[in-house]
Image (tube, grey):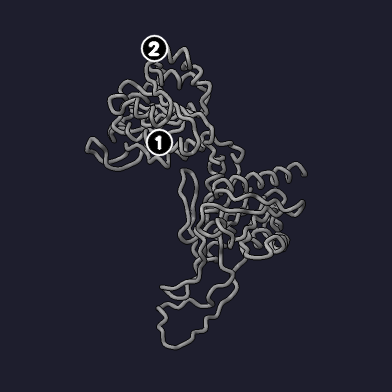
Amino acid sequence: MSVLEDKKIVLGVTGSIAAYKSCEITRELMRRGAQVQVVMTKNAEKFITPLTLQTLSGKKAVSDPFDLQWESEIGHISLADGADAIVVAPATASFIGKMAGAIADTLLGAVILATKAPVVVCPAMNVNMYSNPLVRGNFEKLTGAGVVIVGPAEGDLACGWEGKGRLSETEEIIAEIERAVAPDDFKGKKLLVTAGASREYIDPVRFISNPSTGKMGCAIARAGWLRGADVVLVSGAGAGIDLPGMRRVEAKSVQEMFDVVMENAGDADFVIKAAAVGDYAPAKEEKEKIKKTSETMCLQLEKTPDILEEVGKSLKKNGRGKKSVVVGFSAETQSIIENSQKKLKKKNADMIVANDVSAEGSGFGTDTNQAVFIKPEGEPQSLPLMTKDALGHKILDAALGIYEGKYDNG
């Protein structure tokens, strides 16, 4: 379930060449379960028709503040009161100036001034307009009033110039809308997440690894970011997402990941180790490619550092373990509950997320997962198959419950 499910989003569209991108934004919001009401300025209608956006959203796209029928049926105050978020994409320099000056000479402007909902503004303009001190001053006024500014992006502009001024990509805009409507129950908390697979090199062209794509760990990191956490994502090979304000550190080998985790775990409120790392690594990495010279080859392996266990020990030793929450993962193919309960105890973890990677829809590289939460007390909690994004939020819910319990108890 998306955080946008059943959320009421007012999408404001102003008179920019980028107005056509509002179609894609509308469709993506609808795909994630949001209810979209489009409010246009008159100049926006010169770039895209209200009928187009009405067809996509399923609701009349409005622009006239003196549309008496619409005003009597819905009204701009009701629209402002009922919105979960108001998004202006694209937002021109002119409209941003009016917002900064609290001018409500358009229906969209009136709705924005009357709302208490989060407001997200996505600028689109010429690079010189964007860098103009007067426009920069307007941005400062808006951010000072709590408005979220997304972009603009850098690149080729419709006017022929190159630089900052492009409307941000839809994916980035949607992420900020999700963040605006999501609960902020992780605000002020540090979340350290590991994701992806480790690579232990045999020689420059060969390595030992596993099929993990990091989707689960990235889903947890994204969920934490949406909910206001200060996120540090330690990403293995081929994994990782980049979100504004989130710090991502790449670590390919187990040793590299161990070093980064231990460096950042000391002040973390939550440590969630979702990465699939190797238990063993080649004792020696050859500097040159190994040639095929014999029928057999013997490869000596040595044990790698146990990141989860060492984090648990470290936090327990410095007293941080009384407040921090440590969550590990257990990818199993048999005796899932029994093996995960043993792991929970051995690793000094607060919770283990166990899953059967041999089950359909629950293995590496899938967009879904089915998990069992194992805690020191109580019965194992089995969850149904769901998207990894949804499971990411479930894991954070459980971790937050443990965290609050630790504080309640001392």
Q: Position of residue 70 (x, y in %)?
A: 43, 15
Along the polypeptide, which appears first: circle 1 or circle 2?
1
Q: Position of residue 117 (x, y in %)?
A: 52, 26
Three-letter amino acid code at the position of disc 2: Phe
Between 297 and 367, the one lying in front of the other is: 367
Give the secondary structure at mark 1: helix
Give the side of residue 339 with respect to residue 154, left or right: right
Give the secondary structure at mark 2: loop
Establish if 5 lies above or below 234: above
Image quadrant where residue 336 sits:
bottom right
> Cα distance, mark 1 to mark 2?
27 Å
Give the side of residue 74 with respect to residue 14, left or right: right
Residue beneath the point at 66% across and 44% down:
400
Residue beneath the point at 49% across and 16% down:
77
Residue beneath the point at 37% across and 27% down:
13
Q: Position of residue 387 (x, y in %)?
A: 55, 48
- Label 1 close to label 2 by CB (< 8 Å): no
Between 88 and 340, the one lying in front of the other is: 340
Quadrant into which the C terminus falls: top right
Residue 21 appears anywhere in the view: yes
Residue beneath the point at 55% across and 36% down:
182
| Residue that lies at the very extreme toward the left in this rendered image | 160
Category of crowding for the residue at label 1, using alpha-carbon neighbours closer than 10 angstroms: few (below 14), some (14–19), many (at least 20):
some
Q: Which mark is residue 25?
A: 1
Between 328 and 318, the one lying in front of the other is: 328
Three-letter amino acid code at the position of disc 1: Ile
Residue 140 appears anywhere in the view: no
Q: Which residue is mark 2?
A: 66
Q: Which mark is residue 342?
A: none
Establish if 328 lies above or below 298: above
Establish if 177 lies above or below 365: above
